[in-house]
Amino acid sequence: MVLNIYILSVVLLTFANGFAHFYFAVKIKNKFPSESNFLNSIAISILWFVAGGLYPFFFPIDDQFRQFYHILGAQIICLYSYAVVLFLFVVQYIFRVWRHPEIKEERTIENFIKKFNERNDKKNLDLEKNSHSISTDINRKLFHLIPPGVLIILWEFSIHFWADVFNQDVIWGITEEEYGVWLIMTIGFTAVMVFGILDYIRLSFVFEKRNAYHLMPKNLTGIFLKTLKKDEVCEISATAALILSFIPIFFFPISIFAAAVLIASIGDGAASLIGIKFGKRHFPKNSKKTIIGYVAGFLGSFLTALFVYIIFESSIPLLKIIILSISGAIVFLIVDLLDLKINDNILNPIFCGLLMGFLYFVI
């Protein structure tokens, strides 16, 4: 483990975001007690602290070659990410809000909720039976496929192109695995910082005198309009939580990591889309989830994991691949059946990864 000043700056900033998310969770609970999922918000806050605590352990060696990457990573995560977002909001204020003061009155959380309800009314959606439409679900699942897809592509680039094709490992003095870890950690932490800032701006309506919701660009509010569930309108969004939940399982082999994060996206997508489109029988009866959704989620998770292990672990016995795939699918099914107050995007990658990782080393 390395804990120099550069890595420590990332740790402290991550902890600060954990405290900030907790503060927002308390404010939302006090102002919107009926819409607040306080337990889920606390889980997201804890994930920030876990991510910060684990960050130094991804960098076991400290020398002149690796310290360059420590410095560069800290600059990107702690400075450039915030500078870019701040610049965009300043531009938004100068060229839009300042020149058109009426925007401040138009861009409010009340108007957002009104548009959200109108959009669901057009789709004849009963929000008591379904928290979102199938088009919203498709948008959500496609959006949630981006983080795991990008991280896996970055790893493949590091292993098969950065080193094998460009021979950068010889030039920079670090292995392709070390570069892959650094690249994924840097991009991943930068992404959660950016999503965190967007959440702070979006949820700033809880502060009457410091409300900055009007600074949200129209395109971003459009994305939130198409991807948020009813119970997420006044809540911390799931995107940052999804990426944060990947961090504890990144210590496992890449096959375990890839299977777990894709189960969280593809398995969950199969369960939700099939359940909304074809589901008739709900289980339990008062639940929004359906039996066919459970089956689709299990099969989607199993086939996803099976495909990943065949690609990444073709040398291990087929029986072991099947056992690992089934174990991941079973965990997904259990989490889905329990229907806990904590978002599945947090629970699925962590618990699927933990069980598959355990079985990977003991079988």
Image: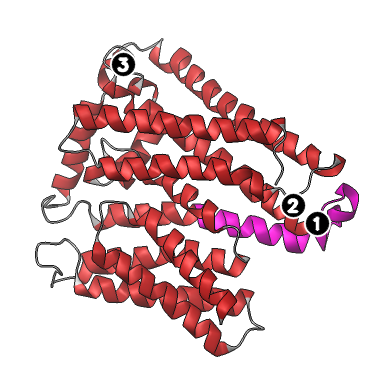
Q: Choose mark 1 or mark 3, whichever is in front.
A: 1
Going by the numbered disc 3, the residue's amino acid type is Lys
- Observer-nearest residue: 242 or 327? 327
**Looking at the image, which residue is at 34% across and 14% down?**
210
C-alpha span from label 1 to label 2:
6 Å
Q: Is residue 107 visible?
A: no
Residue neighbourhood size for the residue with mark 2, other residues' Cα within 10 Å, grouped as few (<14), some (14–19), many (≥20): many
Going by the numbered disc 1, the residue's amino acid type is Thr
Q: Give the numbered dot on residue 179.
A: 2
Q: Give the numbered dot on residue 11.
A: none
Q: Choose mark 2 or mark 3, whichever is in front.
A: 2
The secondary structure that most of the magenta stretch takes on is helix
Task: Read off the residue under disc 1.
Answer: 175
> Looking at the figure, which quarter contains the C terminus?
bottom right
Going by the numbered disc 2, the residue's amino acid type is Tyr
Residue 74 lies, in percent from the top left, at: 67, 34
C-alpha span from label 2 to label 3:
45 Å
Task: Read off the residue under disc 3.
Answer: 104
Residue 301 lies, in percent from the top left, at: 41, 72
Q: Indicate which disc, 1 or 3, sits on the residue closer to the N terminus.
A: 3
C-alpha span from label 1 to label 3:
51 Å
Answer whether labels 1 and 2 touch (C-beta < 8 Å): yes
Q: Is residue 86 visible?
A: yes
Residue neighbourhood size for the residue with mark 1, other residues' Cα within 10 Å, grouped as few (<14), some (14–19), many (≥20): some
Magenta part of the chain: 147-174
**Looking at the image, which residue is at 25% across and 51% down?**
341
Give the SS element for disc 3: helix
Is 280 situated above or below 251?
Answer: below
> Is-magenta flag for residue 299?
no
Q: Dividing the picture into quarters, in which one does residue 11 lie?
A: top right
- Observer-nearest residue: 91 or 338? 338
